[in-house]
Amino acid sequence: MTESVLCYIGLGSNLDQPVQHVQCALEELALLPNTVLLQHSSLYSSTPVGPQDQPDFINAVAALSTRLSPDALLDELQALEQAHQRVRERHWGPRTLDLDLLLYGNEVIDTDRLKVPHPYMTERNFVLYPLAEIAPMCEIPGADTLTTLLSGCTLGSLTKLQV
């Protein structure tokens, strides 16, 4: 078994009571094998990236300490998505639950199956702002500091929810 690694997971949902899907997924992340949920951000509402003919998203970021390998963690995340009846109809389309492995320690992973840091995380306000809430000093391998990235990323329509 490997040493514990700090990682960050992006959560998103915009179908079938998205607040409940994200809240439930946060509870389920705490139950993953060899993993501890350390903390999570508030929930945020954001407009969709890509096709605009879909509801707004509910987003959050969770910090985990895990002994799972990156691929094993990805398997667990995809199993949670399937448990929430995730259907992949179109790229950046609506979904009941989306779980993205944003960061896995300081590792840079580039395989056909997994890219870490997540390729779009440095451009997404719905990732950067929740991440800054729980890890303001976070450094993203191969990118600027979170503080620098936030300075170039507008809040836009991103709204912190009071739930």
Image (tube, rainbow, N blue to C red):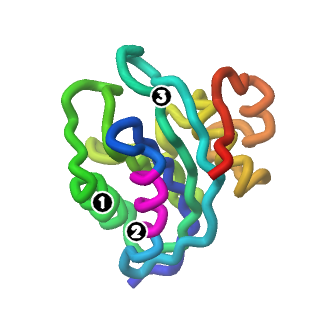
Within 10 angstroms of label 3, few (less than 14), some, or many (20 or more) residues? some
Task: Specify start and end residues of the magenta stretch as a single range.
Answer: 20-29
- For the residues labelled 1 and 2, the Cα–Cα distance comes to 8 Å
Q: In this view, does 37 lie above or below 138?
A: below
- The residue tagged 2 is 28
Q: Which of marks 2 and 3 is nearer the N terminus?
A: 2
Q: Report the magenta stretch's main SS.
A: helix
Within 10 angstroms of label 2, few (less than 14), some, or many (20 or more) residues? few
Q: Is residue 149 left or right of residue 63?
A: right
Which quadrant of the figure has residue 161? top right
Q: Image quadrant for the N terminus?
A: bottom left
Q: Which residue is drawn at 61% across and 60% down?
A: 40
Circle 2 SS class? helix
Within 10 angstroms of label 1, few (less than 14), some, or many (20 or more) residues? some
Evaluate if marks 1 and 2 touch, with contact meaning CB atoms under 8 Å apart: yes
Q: Is residue 28 magenta?
A: yes
Q: In this view, does 85 lie above or below 87?
A: below
- For the residues labelled 2 and 3, the Cα–Cα distance comes to 23 Å
Res. 80 mark:
1
- The answer to whether residue 153 is visible is no
